[in-house]
Amino acid sequence: MSAPSPSASLTDNALQVHLIKAGRTKISYPVDLLHDDGTRITVRGPWAGDGVRDFGFVQFAPGDVFTEYYWRDRWYAVKEVRAADGSLKGWYCDITRPAVRTDDGDIRSEDLDLDLWVSADGSQVIRLDEDEFADSGLTDRDPAAAQAATRALDDLERLAKQGGFTALLARQPLT
């Protein structure tokens, strides 16, 4: 995920992404709106965290650029991660409730703990944070949302293993 940047965008397309977790704002950060077709919202912003964040399978570092795709009708967000030199690192996928544009135009995305990492070459498709999801209590609190979240993770994993991310992000029909 992107982190707040002291050099927030000053363009007319500037807005904030607010990631909500367990009812509170986990992080907010500036991005530039690239496109909003009423269903899918596409934004771009820099990784501006303090130093490098090493997940073991990928590192997010200053200079990395995130192009983030949010849907109003799907239970996930996909974040394409590129290094400062433009090379694709992969896709970090958050399982979320469908995204909402707030009255001031910002994006509100509620994180449901499940994540998926897909490396640029597709050789790594890694399900993440299933233990956090199990501990979250969502299954008891909101069984329908828990079922939608696990289905979304399964769907993204299937797409990743079949090479379907390009079509998903290009808005081409999925096969």
Image (cartoon, rainbow, N blue to C red):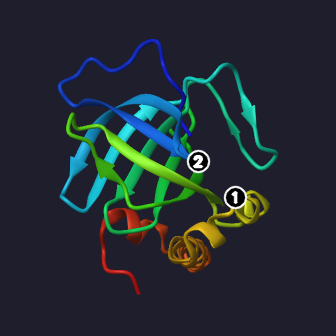
Q: Residue type at mark 2: give it.
A: Ala
Mark 2 touches mark 1? (CB < 8 Å): yes
Q: Is residue 171 left or right of residue 53?
A: left
> What SS does tag 1 mark?
loop
Which mark, by number, is residue 136?
Answer: 1
Q: Crowding near pointer 2: few (<14 within 10 Å), some, many (20+)?
A: few
Please say whether residue 56 is visible from this viewpoint. yes
Using the image as rendered, state which of residue 84 and residue 21 is in the foreground: 21
Which mark, by number, is residue 22?
Answer: 2
Provide residue 137's location: percent of width, then percent of height: 68, 63
- Image height check: is 71 above or below 16? below
Residue occupying the point 41% across, 87% down: 175
Using the image as rendered, state which of residue 103 and residue 58 is in the foreground: 103
**Quarter of the N terminus within the rendering:** top right
Residue occupying the point 17% across, 25% down: 12
Residue occupying the point 18% across, 59% down: 38
Q: Choose the circle earlier in sequence order: 2 or 1.
A: 2
Residue occupying the point 65% across, 29% down: 61
Provide residue 37's location: percent of width, then percent of height: 18, 57
Total label count?
A: 2
Q: Is residue 71 left or right of residue 128?
A: left
Q: Residue type at mark 1: give it.
A: Ser
- Image height check: is 69 above or below 3? below
